Image (tube, rainbow, N blue to C red):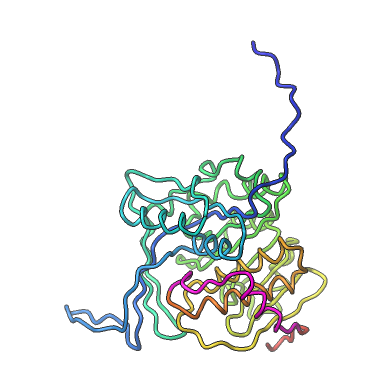
């Protein structure tokens, strides 16, 4: 029998700012005034089709790296050209992909987004996205991270979901701040016991307005805020062009920016997440961090795709300085 290890624990400070866990897949963007398919073997012409970095988690990771954070991504792709594309694009942005698992028997997930101005329809084939489990996230990576963020819970509910609460609890025990953006639920069920447990372990819950209403079952934002903060998590609700709603249990305020003219809103919420996290890691109070998130999200809409115009820190901070913070009005 070998002697017990009596060496002191590793107390070195975390060397990663952010670990993002979730989906990683290319986005095929179809843009034009009329992108509604015409069945019956009819062909339509659209303005543009583009292949871009996709997946809420991957977009958040790239946007955070653009803001100067040291970022790693835990996700799953297939051993195919789509997976190679994602790994190459992430590496070019300086994102650590050592925890992206490559599956030999699964295809990389793919999304087709049909975008017409400020609205879009999204078609996703999950592929390897839904193969990621809590066991695939190296414990050492959790211990190295100051912040752990999870994206797209509902795409990973059957694989990552059972171990997610434990994963977030371990991250918090290691000293990390944790956040969760569930994104949209294609099944329409919205709540399950494992999600409830995960929300309880998240320091921050980051839905958009429609998701906040669906998650809470409330008829309006005041009720949603009350319900979603009951577990003790701080809440930031993304309101699109109207900014963001911040609730920390003691106060609720709305952060807003001067309007911008968007080219494509794909990934704006994910870039918001990156900006918010960057602000919190900088030590900003929640409303000011949300202002940085609003700026990152707004600036990201200036080009196609979720990361095409994801800004650097100086540009985001410059726009965030123009933010206003007001008491939340129930009829906002």
What residue appears at the point 73 percent right and 84 percent down from the top-left corner? 324
Number of numbered discs: 0
View extreme (right): residue: 250
* Vertical comparison of 85 with 34: above or below: above
* Vertical comparison of 212 with 231: above or below: below
> Which residue is at the front of the view, 156 or 226?
156
Q: Residue 74: percent from the left, percent from the top?
A: 52, 50
Magenta residues (range):
305-325
> Which residue is at the front of the view, 331 or 64?
64
What residue appears at the point 36 percent right and 73 percent down from the top-left corner? 29
View extreme (top): residue: 1
View extreme (front): residue: 314
What residue appears at the point 31 percent right and 51 percent down from the top-left corner? 80
Quick one: quadrant of the C terminus? bottom right
* Vertical comparison of 260 with 106: above or below: below
Q: Residue 82: percent from the left, percent from the top?
A: 34, 57
Query: Horizontal placement of 33 versus 66: left or right?
Result: left
Q: Residue 37: percent from the left, percent from the top?
A: 27, 80
Quick one: quadrant of the N terminus? top right
> Which residue is at the front of the view, 56 or 8?
8
Q: Which quadrant of the structure image shows residue 30?
A: bottom left
Query: Horizontal placement of 224 versus 232: left or right?
Result: left
> Is residue 321 magenta-colored?
yes
């Amino acid at each position: 029998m070998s002697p017990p290890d009596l060496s002191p624990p590793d107390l070195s400070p975390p060397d990663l700012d952010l670990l993002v866990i979730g989906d990683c897949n290319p986005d095929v963007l179809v843009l034009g005034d009329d992108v509604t398919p015409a069945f019956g073997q009819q062909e339509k012409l659209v303005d543009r089709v583009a292949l871009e970095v996709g997946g809420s988690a991957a977009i958040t990771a790239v946007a955070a790296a653009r803001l100067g954070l040291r970022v790693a991504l835990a996700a799953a792709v297939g051993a195919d050209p789509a997976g190679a594309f994602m790994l190459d694009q992430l590496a070019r942005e300086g994102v650590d992909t050592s925890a992206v698992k490559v599956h030999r028997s699964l295809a990389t997930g793919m999304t087709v987004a049909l975008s017409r101005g400020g609205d879009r329809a999204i078609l996703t084939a999950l592929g390897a996205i839904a193969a990621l489990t809590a066991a695939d996230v190296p414990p050492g990576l959790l211990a190295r991270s100051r912040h752990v963020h999870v994206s797209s819970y509902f795409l990973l509910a059957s694989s990552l979901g059972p171990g997610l609460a434990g994963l977030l609890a371990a991250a918090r025990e290691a000293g990390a701040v944790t956040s969760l953006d569930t994104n949209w639920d294609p099944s329409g069920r919205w709540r399950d016991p494992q999600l409830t447990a995960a929300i309880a372990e998240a320091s921050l819950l980051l839905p958009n307005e429609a998701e906040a209403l669906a998650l809470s079952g409330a008829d309006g934002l005041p009720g949603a805020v009350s319900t979603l903060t009951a577990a003790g998590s701080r809440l930031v609700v993304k309101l699109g062009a109207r900014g963001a709603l911040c609730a920390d249990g003691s106060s609720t305020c709305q952060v807003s920016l001067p309007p911008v003219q968007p080219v494509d809103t794909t990934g704006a919420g994910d870039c918001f997440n990156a900006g918010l996290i960057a602000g919190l890691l900088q030590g900003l109070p929640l409303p000011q961090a949300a202002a940085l998130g609003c700026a990152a999200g707004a600036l990201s809409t200036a080009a196609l795709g979720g990361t095409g115009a994801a800004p650097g820190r100086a540009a985001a901070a410059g726009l965030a300085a123009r933010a206003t913070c007001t008491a939340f009005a129930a009829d906002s």
